């Protein structure tokens, strides 16, 4: 995805063309980006030969999941609905893990019937619920236990999940108790220690600390886990000066860890696989000026893309056609929704822009469409996938008649 002669292109097709055909707001993904991200992720960890399970909550479009499956990945799911989508995409049950603090009895039953690879347990009571179902079905269920390693991931507080006080996983003491309990159970087969400390992590330090904690806890259990599930969380560059995640160091830390612990590593990446493979194309409805700034009112809103409203996350906005005429003013890109948090970005300069122009909100592939809602009775946008020289609608724009 790049400019060709001042026109932004997704592979071989310009965003101008795409928006004419498919209207706006429009989610658009590049297959090539997706494929490169997966290839790179695999190459970073060649020696480790990990199982890579895509985090479905980051993007749950079935067509995208199908492509991801064809590129060799499994799925990390956090609800029955996500599991059904993963299965619909053709992902094998033995390439699915199920996480989440509030799996219902019905969801657990569904997962147990499907014989998925692992249910990653997040509390004593969930463990007991699984055991109860397993006993009724006269089955032995494969589980992991999610450890809360009490590690500060140094990311946005809203997407931090591995500190004491976060609802996720169990602390060290409880972990040791649950290991003891599972070892004695006739209906549980403990196979995995899992962690997931947060998202959009760019520093290696939190992972380094996390591996130390895991190593110490495993030693205390004296148990050999078939799998160590390190979760997801690897960050991407949303802003130009973001530092890059150091895969090399992470890889060597894990290799050292594996010298002492003979386990298969599982990763659950979401953002690092699909984040920069998606854009949101939006049209300017009005430009509204006051003394302090120019509001650029877009046809996309927080219901279409809510990362700014939800976490304060900034995404770059760029023009669909570059004209080279820069205005040094304060521009605020906002949506039409009746909430003051319905805004995307404030910048001190942008190119000369007028009504009906198109802009591109960058890097929205992860936690974009999967977080979209119908707030203000706005239909969900369409999603398209550009693959080689073909364009495919992978989700039709919702119709107002579906909503009313
Ligand atoms: C959200 C989530 C992930 C994916 O996180 P990314 O930051 O998108 O890589 C992985 N595992 C679990 C359990 C999650 O909840």
Image (tube, helix red, strand yellow):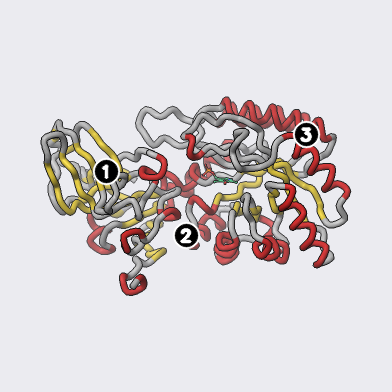
Q: Nearer the viewer, residue 398 or 34?
A: 398
* Left or right: 399 as drawn, with respect to 78: left
- Percent across and percent down for residue 386 are 38, 57
Residue highlighted by disc 1: 3
Few, some or many C-alpha atoms within 10 Å of disc 2 (few <14, some 14-19, many ≥20)?
some
Circle 1 sits in a helix, a strand or a loop, which is it? strand
Under 8 Å from ligand 1: the CB of mark 2? no
* Left or right: 317 as drawn, with respect to 170: left
Asked whether residue 14 is in view, the answer is: no
**Tag 1 or tag 2, which sits nearer the N-term?**
1
Circle 2 sits in a helix, a strand or a loop, which is it? loop
**Tag 3 or tag 1, which sits nearer the N-term?**
1
- Percent across and percent down for residue 53 are 60, 49
Q: CA distance from mark 1 to mark 3?
A: 50 Å
Residue highlighted by disc 3: 218
Residue highlighted by disc 2: 61
Residue shown at 37% from the left, 67% from the top: 396
Asked whether residue 357 is in view, the answer is: yes
Q: Quadrant of the rendered structure where residue 106 is?
A: bottom right
* Left or right: 80 as drawn, with respect to 145: left
């Amino acid at each position: 995805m790049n400019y060709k002669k001042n026109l932004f292109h997704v592979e071989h097709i310009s965003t101008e063309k795409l928006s004419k055909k498919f209207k706006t707001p429009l989610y658009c993904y590049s297959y090539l980006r997706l494929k490169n991200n997966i290839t790179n992720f695999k190459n970073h960890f060649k020696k480790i030969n990990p199982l890579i399970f895509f985090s479905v909550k980051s993007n749950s479009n079935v067509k995208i999941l199908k492509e991801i499956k064809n590129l060799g990945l499994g799925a990390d799911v956090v609800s029955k609905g996500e599991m059904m989508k993963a299965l619909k995409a053709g992902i094998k049950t033995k390439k699915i893990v199920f996480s989440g603090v509030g799996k219902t009895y019905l969801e657990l039953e569904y997962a147990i019937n499907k014989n998925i690879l692992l249910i990653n347990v997040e509390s004593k009571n969930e463990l007991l619920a699984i055991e109860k179902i397993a006993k009724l079905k006269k089955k032995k269920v494969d589980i992991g236990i999610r450890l809360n390693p009490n590690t500060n991931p140094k990311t946005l507080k809203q997407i931090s999940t591995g500190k004491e006080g976060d609802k996720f996983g169990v602390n060290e003491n409880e972990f040791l108790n649950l290991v003891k309990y599972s070892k004695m159970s006739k209906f549980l087969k403990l196979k995995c220690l899992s962690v997931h400390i947060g998202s959009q992590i760019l520093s290696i330090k939190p992972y380094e600390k996390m591996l130390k904690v895991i190593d110490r806890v495993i030693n205390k259990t004296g148990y050999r886990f078939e799998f160590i599930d390190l979760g997801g969380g690897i960050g991407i560059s949303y802003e130009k000066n973001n530092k890059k995640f150091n895969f090399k160091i992470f890889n060597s830390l894990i290799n050292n860890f594996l010298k002492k612990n003979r386990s298969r590593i599982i990763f659950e990446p979401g953002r690092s696989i699909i984040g920069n493979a998606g854009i949101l194309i939006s049209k300017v409805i009005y430009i509204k000026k006051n003394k302090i700034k120019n509001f650029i009112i877009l046809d996309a809103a927080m219901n279409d893309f809510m990362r700014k409203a939800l976490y304060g996350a900034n995404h770059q906005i760029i023009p669909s056609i570059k004209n080279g005429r820069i205005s040094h003013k304060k521009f605020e890109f906002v949506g039409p929704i009746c909430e003051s948090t319905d805004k995307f970005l404030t910048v001190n300069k942008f190119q000369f822009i007028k009504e009906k122009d198109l802009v591109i909100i960058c890097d929205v592939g992860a936690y974009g469409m999967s977080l979209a809602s119908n707030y203000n009775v706005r239909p969900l946008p369409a999603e398209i996938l550009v693959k080689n020289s073909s364009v495919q609608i992978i989700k039709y724009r919702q119709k107002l008649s579906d909503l009313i």
